[in-house]
Amino acid sequence: MAKSDPTEVIPLTIGPRNCEAAIGQNWRWARDFAVRVGVPIWRVGTKSLIPAQPLLQALEREAAKPPPRELTEEEERDAFLARIGYRMKTPAELAPDESEDAILARMGMRRVRR
């Protein structure tokens, strides 16, 4: 019977002490990721453990997703304005003599060219 290498162990659960060795990330990242994607975190006494198989499946699903595309300047502007409770009027909504720059100036804002 051949001896097995003790460093080649497949964990059933991942905890704070084996997290970096098992998945290459620290415990805090793994715990936050598990919560975000719906992987259960088990509490055993005072210890927290993440079941390895569901975590691996969630990591594979996330890795298969395409990266988010970069926003255009207009999309960035619209997202920013939405966060602060504003939106840009469409050209059809503008008064004939009022440009977007005039509206921004009236609001105390100005267009920044990149």
Image: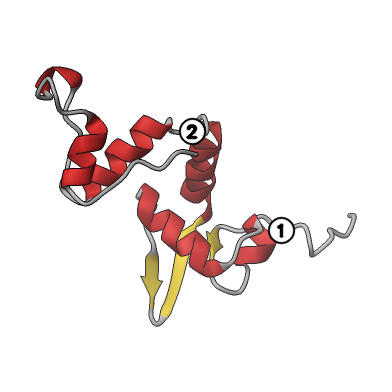
Percent across and percent down for residue 69 are 48, 30
Q: Horizontal and vertical percent for residue 93?
A: 10, 22
Residue behind mark 2: 70
Q: Residue furthest bottom?
A: 46
In this orientation, which residue lies closer to the viewer: 7 or 31? Answer: 31
**Position of the N terminus by quadrant:** bottom right
**Which corner quadrant of the image does residue 35 belong to?**
bottom left
Q: Name which quarter of the figure residue 71 lies in.
A: top left
User: Which residue corresponds to the image point at 22% horizontal and 44% vertical from the top-left?
Assistant: 105
Closest to the observer, 26 or 16: 26
Residue 56 relative to residue 91: left or right: right
**Residue shown at 48%/33% (left/top)?**
70
- The residue to which callout 1 is attached is 9
* Crowding near the residue tagged with mark 2, few <14, some 14–19, many ≥20 C-alpha atoms within 10 Å: few
Residue type beneath disc 2: Glu
User: Is 53 drawn above or below residue 23 in the view shown?
Assistant: above
CA gap between label 2 and label 1 equals 40 Å
Q: Nearer the viewer, mark 2 or mark 1?
A: 2
